[in-house]
Image (cartoon, rainbow, N blue to C red):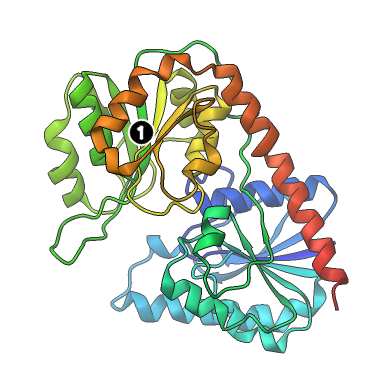
Amino acid sequence: MKILFLSPLTRKITPKITAARPRVIFDLISGLKKRGHKITVIGTEDSKIPGVKIIPVIPKSFYHLAFENPFYAHTSFLTRLSKTFEKIAGKFDVIHNHCYPEFFPLLVSENIKKPILTTIHAQMTKELDSALSLFNNQKNVFFVAISNAEKKLAKKTKIYKVIHNGVDTNLYKFSPKKEDYLLWIGRLSKAKDKNGNFMDPKGIKWAIKLARATGAKILLSGNVEDIEFFNQEVKPYLSDKIKWVGEISFEQPLSKKEVARLMRKAKAFLMTINWEEPFGLVMAEAQSCGTPVIGFKKGSVPELVNDGKTGFVVDPKEGIQGLKRAFKKIDVIKPEDCREYIVKNFSLEKMVENYEKTYQEIITKK
């Protein structure tokens, strides 16, 4: 098949990228290429995918450019992407849309005869659901949710299928030997509530609270969108036992190999989220390494963690007490069970196979 990928313009697509959406795109394209498919990507000029043609519509990833009016600039580049897509779509068998935001290139979809598959990577908010639902009646437009949890939040949008993301089980290798530390990796969001407090969707504050309440050693890392968040909510608590790993950076400072190494040795991975996580690659990566996950029962956590078998799913209402109870029981989880669960359900191979089948299905629909 000839497949056209529509990429987000906020970040480049490269072998080393760690951000979730670009990482899934790179891994999916790599898997499809191995199966003999020809891939073309509309995206950033600094994207590099071996053996793949890149059609650039922006000099480099948007987050590394500066503009007086970022909104106008981003939407201008997205418009260019959409019109380029409209012009060349007829040369391909299927289009796979991973854009950010997902709905933008669909504004030209009525002028395109080929099937368009859109993977919804973002949290399914009411606003996103409402926008995507405007395309429900177009026969060539199909939506994929990345978890059943995300699908449930789609009250208006017609979801064609759920396809879970997959992780590289060769990179995230199994290790039964663990060291005595917890691990938290996530994003320090710049989002604030109406009172001006950081919303902390990824829940780093819960991770710090658990470490302080139990005396456990914890390693923290991630991309810092707002240095004020780090200085206010993280830095004051850093110590010999609560450590930040890597630089303080807008992008994840650790490489995929460094993350995998930390995951292999961790006693448990913490997914102490405060939002409806659409998927959460880090949970699958940690379990692939044989490391159990302790997470709040929000979003996709119950889908990715087999409660009592590969980790523990905690009711958010139980807060720190629930996390402490799960932590006390963590030694009953077998690393082998964690690994087996991911290999069976969330491997790259399974993701690529599911998308390939879906392409074939929508191509034959009339």
Which residue does the image show at 82% across and 55% down from the upper left?
37
Query: Which residue is at the front of the view, 13 or 362?
Result: 362
- Residue lying at the far top in this picture: please name it: 177
Above or below: residue 99 compared with residue 338: below
Which residue does the image show at 70% across and 52% down from the upper left?
29
Query: Which residue is at the front of the view, 311 or 27?
Result: 311
- Residue lying at the far right in this picture: please name it: 364
Residue 124 image offset from top left, x and y in percent: 47, 64
Callout 1: SS:
strand
User: Hey, which quadrant is residue 319 in on the image?
Assistant: top left
Residue with the mark numbered 1: 184
Above or below: residue 217 compared with residue 2: above
Within 10 Å of disc 1 (Cα), the crowding (few <14, some 14-19, many 20+) is: many
- Residue 57 appears left or right of 109: left
Residue 127 image offset from top left, x and y in percent: 42, 75
Which residue does the image show at 50% across and 79% down from the upper left?
131
Residue 20 image offset from top left, x and y in percent: 50, 49
Residue 38 visible in the current orientation:
no
**Quadrant for the C terminus in the image:** bottom right
Query: Which residue is at the front of the view, 19 or 318?
Result: 318
Amino acid type for the residue under numbered disc 1: Trp
- Residue 111 appears left or right of 75: right
Residue 105 visible in the current orientation:
yes
- Residue 217 appears left or right of 24: left
**Quadrant for the N terminus in the image:** bottom right
